[in-house]
Image (cartoon, helix red, strand yellow):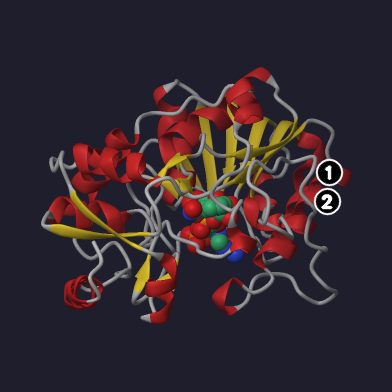
Amino acid sequence: MRLLILGGTQFLGRAVARLALARGYDVTCVARGASGAPVPGVRFVPVDRSDPAGLAPLDGERFDAAIDVTRWLDQARHTVAALADRVGHWTFVSSISVYASFAAPGGGVADTPLLPPAPDGVTGPGPDFQWYGECKVSIENLYAEAVERLFVCRAGLIIGPEDPSDRFPYWVRRLAAGGEVLAPGAPDDPVQYVDVDDLAAWLLHAAATGVTGTYDGIGAAVPRVAALGGIAAGVGSPEPRLTWVDSDFLQAHEVRPWSGKRSLPLWVPGTEWAGFLARDATPALAAGLVTRPVADSARATLTWMDAHPGAVRQGGLEPAEEAAILREWHAGGKG
Ligand SMILES: NC(=O)c1ccc[n+]([C@@H]2O[C@H](COP(=O)([O-])OP(=O)(O)OC[C@H]3O[C@@H](n4cnc5c(N)ncnc54)[C@H](OP(=O)(O)O)[C@@H]3O)[C@@H](O)[C@H]2O)c1
């Protein structure tokens, strides 16, 4: 298999490259080389895809499959112009951020409305992910018009080693530290994610077997208590002391959802978000996505974090912030 990865110097792209090499594929990665290094063993072609002629170094080449992770519309335009008819099977890695509503748990590709495409003149996301979902919609549309054999994978939260965000690493770090742990919301709240290596394996399965169509790329939703328990087991703290603090209390204490400073990752309160971490994973699982226990993801993530201190953007609650909130929660006679 001659595989082209448009990207391949970061988290998911590197995982795909590593797995493809292990399968004996001939792997070419194209990126600037600005945000990370390619995996040793790939053929790396430095290109700037924002340049309309940036992919010229690939002129005349053919690939059995290509996987594009871009979030930039101009990059996708230049890519289809240069390569559309020289690739057998295309994968575009999109995002569940293309959806316009997350109110309904169990939502699927067919029954969840999409955001509109990016407005004229917007070619990529701005600060704070502005236009991110709209750009992904536009890129999906572009690929759908330009190529025949297309697999669109709308990824949900991707977890595992080399994740630079604070979203899963916060919980790995926090549960590994032990002690009383502030757990947001309720034990039965659904949470959902997909391991980066499982997602990579599925993308390669799709490329190798010719899967086409649009899927959410996410594992089955699980109760938050099971997710936190699994992470704790994976990092060697099998019986975490979880104190459940309800969402209203957390919001009243200015804890931010999802990501960033003073946040609690894997927590997105509010009825309008009830389906955000509870999408229907059945089609993906039926189409070949195989998911590992979250304990394995947590263990691998901790090993990577230990080996790369400083690689993760710090976020979540600082220990002192968590302790202060827990004190107030207990002082109010709770938990
Ligand atoms: N992380 C999550 O939880 C999550 C959730 C939903 C969806 N997703 C999607 O999953 C995918 C993750 O992909 P990823 O982990 O590989 O990271 P990524 O941040 O999407 O990687 C972008 C890649 O494009 C390259 N690139 C950027 N600008 C370029 C340019 N001008 N010319 C050439 N190459 C350029 C980057 O390399 P250089 O900078 O070196 O050029 C990098 O390899 C993305 O599609 C993301 O939208 C992620």
Q: Amino acid at mark 2?
A: Asn
Kindly identify the residue that appears in the image at 52 percent across and 34 percent down: 220
Quadrant in which the C terminus appears:
bottom left
Disc 2 element: helix
Disc 1 element: helix
Q: Is residue 189 left or right of residue 208?
A: left
Q: Is residue 188 left or right of residue 105?
A: left
Residue 326 falls in image quadrant: bottom left
> Relative to 261, does residue 112 appear above or below in the rendering?
above
> Relative to 167, does residue 41 appear above or below in the rendering?
above
Q: List x then y, in percent, for residue 185.
A: 40, 59
Residue 23 falls in image quadrant: top left
Q: List x then y, in percent, for residue 296.
A: 28, 33
Residue 58, label in figure = none
Instruction: Decide which of 266, 121 is in the foreground and name it.
Output: 266
Q: Quadrant of ligand 1?
A: bottom right
> Relative to 206, does residue 190 appear above or below in the rendering?
below
Total marks shown come to 2
Kindly identify the residue that appears in the image at 28 percent across and 55 percent down: 171
Q: List x then y, in percent, for residue 283.
A: 66, 28
Label 1 crowding class (10 Å Cα cut-off): few <14, some 14-19, many 20+?
Answer: some
Instruction: Judge: label 1 CB < 8 Å from ligand 1.
Output: no
Q: List x then y, in percent, for residue 62.
A: 70, 32
Q: Mark 2 sits on what residue?
A: 141
Q: Is residue 128 visible?
A: yes
Q: Is residue 52 visible?
A: no
Outermost residue toward the top in this view: 209
Kindly identify the residue that appears in the image at 64 percent across and 71 percent down: 125
Q: Amino acid at mark 1?
A: Ala
For marks 2 and 1, give the CA distance.
Answer: 5 Å
Marks 2 & 1, CB-CB < 8 Å contact: yes
Q: Mark 1 sits on what residue?
A: 144
